[in-house]
Image: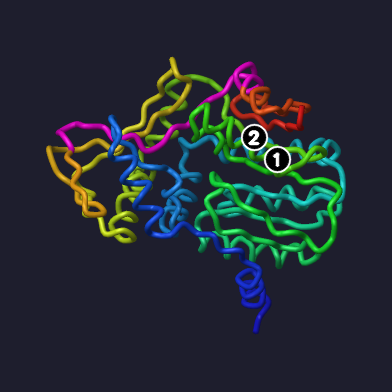
Amino acid sequence: MNAAASALMRARSALTDLHPLPDDIAADAVAGLSKTPKTLPSKYFYDAEGSRLFEAITRQPEYYLTGTELALLEASLPSIAQAIGPGVHVVEYGSGSGRKTELLLESLHDVVAYTAVEISRTALIESTARLSQQFPQIEMLPVCADFTRPLALPGAKRPAQRTVMFFPGSTLGNFTTDEAARLLVAMRQTMGAHGCALIGIDLDKDDALIEAAYNDAAGVTAQFTLNLLARLNREIGSDFDLGGFRHKAVYARERGRIETFLVSQRAQSVQLAGRTFDFAADEAMQVEYSHKYTDAGFNALATHAGLRTTHGWNDARDWFGLRLLQPA
């Protein structure tokens, strides 16, 4: 057995699998489609195909977020490592491909363990296997779960001096303000009194620049959004016609967020979990938010969750920021 195969087996054997069941997905979809306006939860974007498409999005020329954050992370890591300190257990929500994780684990001193919490089982196992090859001295404790729900994290064999929550990629912006506050409260509880959280935030900027990032010319983001319907069809037996919906993303400046919709191309009905849901022509179903923050807005959110910003790093253009939070 080669090293890669051995790492993959270790990742699978260490996996804590709390992946959402089809009944959970169906219940969430029914709840969203019963609202006015209709919604679907963005957390279900990330099946294997959704994870692949998102990685493709990050390589589109219009999508400034990933490249800007990676460059900022690389430039700021010495300062970040000093602020965090040694002997930590890193816990990452929504780990994805793990590219940013590699940079962080390389830079921190004496990482005790790494726990990735990721809803896509395939992406989780593959990234954990790769990281275990790169960092054999770090205990890998992957958890396949919806991190928006309460969960117990696995304990490391060696005690850590502090827990570090790592939440890059501006994923916090995908939640409403109330949801984001609840998630930060949960992070505060998980990290404990001496822990910290390193969070990526996309900063407010020119409307056209923001909108272009979510409407790439190659149409990859549109494929990604429509894949949500394909997943529901496959996993819970709905009958969405993918050709009957189109992707739409607009920046609502008054609310400080990108709002992404799937718009019905015609009057149509969808069967899901024994229910019928009617769509009017041009009816927009909300599938994702992506908030863009000011320092004042983000600090107010952190304060509401019982946290305070102790350190901050921005790229030279002030497009993207990293913030280190600790319990207030």
At x 18%, y 37%, the residue is 279
At x 53%, y 25%, the residue is 292
Foreground residue among 163 and 201: 163
Q: How is the image coloured?
A: rainbow
- Residue 185's label in the rendered image is 2
Q: Quadrant of residue 247?
A: top left
Name the secondary structure under disc 1: helix
Amino acid on which disc 1 is placed: Gln
Question: Where in the figure is residue 303, as x and y percent of width and height?
Answer: 68, 23
**Screen quadrant of the N terminus:** bottom right
Name the secondary structure under disc 2: helix
Q: Which residue is mark 1?
A: 189
- Furthest toward the bottom, the residue is 1
Question: Where in the figure is residue 305, as x and y percent of width and height?
Answer: 65, 28
160 in relation to 197, above or below = below
Residue 89 as seen in the image, left or right of residue 131 = right
Amino acid on which disc 2 is placed: Val
Foreground residue among 250 and 14: 14
- State yes or no: discs 2 and 1 in contact (Cβ < 8 Å): yes
At x 38%, y 59%, the residue is 22
281 in relation to 270, above or below = above
234 in relation to 12, above or below = above
- Residue 15's label in the rendered image is none
| 281 drawn magenta | yes
Residue 188 as seen in the image, left or right of residue 174 = right
Q: Which residues are magenta?
A: 279-300
Q: Residues within 10 Å of mark 1 (few under 14, many from 20)?
A: few
| 31 drawn magenta | no
